[in-house]
Image (cartoon, rainbow, N blue to C red):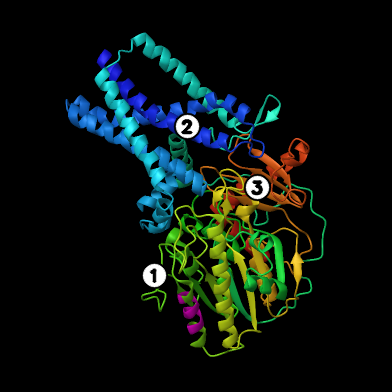
């Protein structure tokens, strides 16, 4: 019995040895940063003992897995294979914990269940493909120094496990019981109190912890638990459900519609969706930089407070083309069992109205089944990096093709069709350059993509747009094409701790994106400062082109609608952030618990001063509205066909 207890202790101590040193490294890294926003280092350290309980939970989960996998072998008397299984499990955890932590640092989210499914090729939304792009994106950040930490973690866990077994320290039954009781209470206190105290107040001061209370293995297990309900969710009616979400907020005063002076007309359309370009690029660069984007802004309308409702590509496309709220969980809409959503996307509406529609993706459209989603709208032409003509021998990486290959394909496709004013063209072009690691022809990606690397990629994108627009002018379409340029989402560079990359954060650098509009009927040098969102794009373009928008579209027609609306945003698991922009105010809940902030963006565009204590009523109202929006979106997509059949007869002419 003593030997059995010693064996259990050996496995658990090995798992703890993997977690605790890594916890120290994370804490030291945060402390070295001094005071970040409202982080008070001494008060943060007071919270650390509580947060260590999550690492104890991670060690316990790992030990239970190792012992459970080895138990059938040990029961059958196969001690050698049982120890091999335990050792492999310890080594695997020693690899996973630091790697997930580094991925959390550079991408803003750990290697949770969904990310692992993508990496292993088992997620339905990736079409069953092993995601080479995601693997490359993660492996690029595993520098030699970080790989050394990973190796040390694995060696430490195995050394402690083997050393404990050889030394064989005896732990009495009573000592084991006391330690287990203390550990259970410690883990329970962490599980119950850490979320509430994570970024809450301590000694009268709010202490931002920046996810120090989180631990990799419990996060992984939690992401599995939270993903399961979406797999077997039974739709349930929660009050009257309609396509029109009414935010429980005081309405904003009417203003002149941003495009009230625009003239509608039947013209060609070029819709360019950039990759990972935040709105700040046109505000922070010099006047001589980005000449093409600046020229477009001077020739038309620049929306300075435009937002994506979700900082990921697929959901951004869904909102952009369908004028609907994305699914408020991790699953892409194309992966849902609710196939009725988006019956009338912008592509299908344009095609039915007589436009010749084409879609060109420089990236791999199989990722998250984006191409399948676009094909359901039946464009006349669709190409991505798997079948783009003219790519033989061209530069490419795992994220996409040389953009010049895509530009040539676009121009050749247009040249192959006779000019027909009765049937104008509508081209949607999604770039791949801009995605980390920010490499492009002539500039290989770096081990850690920096803001400077990203700026080089954006400058390259500007040149790409220039070559495309010059090609359109040479083909005689310089004056008869409505040009729309926006981005799927932004990109962060630790402006806020934990805010690298895109996906799990909703600060301005992640969700505020450029939107430029120029061409026939558009007045030059117009700046729109009221908040707008991707859902507004399709109805506004339809109005500018003289097309009637489907009644299911939920965004504003910015040529006619005088009433500004709240802008809602959400992000992915396991962080599951939520935000709302209402007038100058922005409320954010980053990862549950008390981690909420209220900012006045006109006075504080950097989102550095939390005003919740000064405006608690406003913060609560915005929170309630955001939660209602998220719940409404889930219910609508779950019951889409029922709501459609109920409301469609009333909308019939």
- Select label 1 or label 2 by which is in front: 2
Looking at the image, which residue is at 23% across and 33% down? 84
Q: Secondary structure at mark 1?
A: loop
Query: For mark 1, what is the residue?
Result: 386
The residues tagged by marks 1 and 3 sit, at their Cα atoms, a distance apart of 36 Å
Q: Is residue 273 magenta?
A: no
* Comes first in the chain, label 1 or label 3: 1
Label 1: few (<14), some or many (≥20) within 10 Å?
A: some
Give whichever of discs 2 and 3 has the lower sequence position: 2
Instruction: Compare residues 583 and 502 and report the one nearer the observer.
Output: 502
Residue shown at the point (27%, 18%) measured from the top left? 167
Q: Nearer the viewer, residue 270 or 201?
A: 201
Residue at 78 percent of width and 71 percent of height: 260
Tell me if label 1 and label 2 are in contact, CB under 8 Å. Answer: no
Q: Is residue 445 left or right of residue 428?
A: left
Where is mark 3, residue-wise?
579
> Measured from the top left, where is residue 437 in percent x and y?
47, 58
Q: Which residue is mark 2?
A: 23
Rounded to the nearest angstrom, the CA distance separating label 2 from label 3 is: 29 Å
Q: Earlier in the sequence, mark 1 or mark 2?
A: 2
Tell me if residue 345 comes above or below residue 447 in the rendering.
below
Please give the range of residues in magenta.
Answer: 405-412
Which residue occupies the foreground of this view, 653 or 614? 614
Q: Nearer the viewer, mark 2 or mark 3?
A: 2
């Amino acid at each position: 019995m003593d030997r059995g207890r010693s064996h259990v202790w050996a496995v658990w101590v090995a798992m703890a040895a993997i977690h605790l040193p890594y916890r120290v490294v994370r804490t030291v890294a945060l402390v070295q940063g001094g005071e970040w926003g409202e982080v008070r280092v001494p008060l943060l350290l007071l919270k650390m003992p509580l947060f260590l309980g999550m690492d104890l939970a991670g060690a316990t989960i790992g030990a239970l897995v190792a012992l459970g996998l080895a138990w059938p072998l040990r029961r059958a008397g196969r001690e050698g294979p049982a120890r091999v299984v335990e050792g492999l499990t310890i080594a695997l955890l020693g690899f996973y914990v630091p790697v997930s932590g580094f991925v959390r640092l550079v991408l803003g989210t750990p290697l949770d269940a969904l990310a692992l499914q993508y990496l292993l090729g088992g997620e339905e939304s990736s079409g069953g493909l092993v995601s080479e792009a995601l693997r490359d994106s993660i492996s690029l950040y595993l520098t030699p120094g970080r790989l050394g930490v990973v190796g040390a973690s694995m060696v430490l866990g195995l050394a402690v496990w083997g050393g404990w077994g050889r030394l064989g320290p005896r732990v009495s039954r009573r000592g084991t019981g006391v330690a287990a009781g203390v550990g259970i209470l410690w883990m329970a206190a962490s599980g119950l109190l850490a979320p509430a105290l994570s970024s809450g107040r301590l000694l009268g001061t709010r202490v931002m912890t920046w996810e120090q209370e989180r631990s990799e293995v419990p996060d992984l297990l939690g992401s599995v638990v939270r993903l399961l309900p979406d797999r077997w969710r039974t739709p349930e009616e929660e009050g009257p459900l309609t396509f029109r979400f009414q935010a429980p907020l005081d309405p904003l005063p009417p203003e002149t519609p941003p495009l009230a002076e625009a003239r509608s007309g039947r013209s060609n359309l070029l819709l360019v969706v950039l990759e990972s370009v935040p709105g700040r690029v046109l505000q922070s660069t010099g006047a001589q930089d980005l000449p093409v984007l600046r020229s477009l802004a001077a020739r038309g309308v620049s929306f300075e407070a435009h937002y994506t409702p979700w900082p990921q590509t697929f959901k951004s496309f869904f909102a952009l083309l369908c004028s609907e709220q994305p699914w408020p969980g991790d699953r892409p809409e194309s992966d849902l069992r609710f196939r009725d959503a988006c019956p009338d996307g912008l592509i299908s509406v344009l095609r039915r109205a007589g436009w010749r529609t084409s879609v060109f993706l420089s990236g791999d459209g199989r990722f998250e089944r984006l191409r399948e989603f676009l094909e359901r709208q039946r464009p006349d032409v669709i190409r991505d990096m798997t079948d783009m003509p003219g790519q033989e021998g061209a530069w490419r990486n795992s994220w996409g093709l040389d953009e010049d290959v895509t530009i040539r394909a676009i121009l050749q496709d247009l040249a192959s069709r006779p000019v027909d004013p009765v049937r104008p063209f509508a081209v949607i072009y999604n770039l791949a350059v801009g995605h980390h690691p920010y490499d492009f022809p002539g500039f290989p990606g770096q081990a850690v993509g920096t803001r400077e690397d990203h700026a080089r990629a954006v400058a390259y994108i500007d040149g790409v747009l220039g070559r495309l627009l010059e090609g359109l002018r040479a083909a005689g379409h310089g004056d008869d094409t409505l040009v729309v340029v926006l981005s799927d989402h932004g990109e962060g560079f630790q402006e806020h701790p934990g805010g690298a990359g895109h996906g799990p954060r909703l600060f301005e650098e992640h969700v505020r994106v450029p939107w430029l509009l120029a061409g026939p009927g558009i007045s030059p040098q117009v700046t729109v400062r009221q908040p707008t969102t991707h859902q507004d794009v399709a109805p506004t373009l339809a109005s500018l082109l003289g097309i009637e928008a489907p009644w299911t579209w939920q965004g504003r027609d910015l040529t006619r609608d005088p009433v500004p609306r709240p802008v809602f945003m959400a992000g992915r698991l396991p962080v599951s952030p939520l935000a709302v922009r209402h007038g100058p105010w922005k409320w954010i809940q980053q990862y549950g618990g008390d981690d909420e902030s209220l900012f006045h963006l006109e006075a504080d565009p950097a989102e550095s001063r939390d005003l919740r204590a000064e405006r608690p009523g406003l913060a609560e109202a915005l929170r309630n509205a955001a939660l209602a929006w998220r719940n409404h979106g889930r219910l609508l997509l779950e019951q889409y066909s029922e709501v459609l059949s109920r409301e469609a007869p009333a909308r019939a002419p």
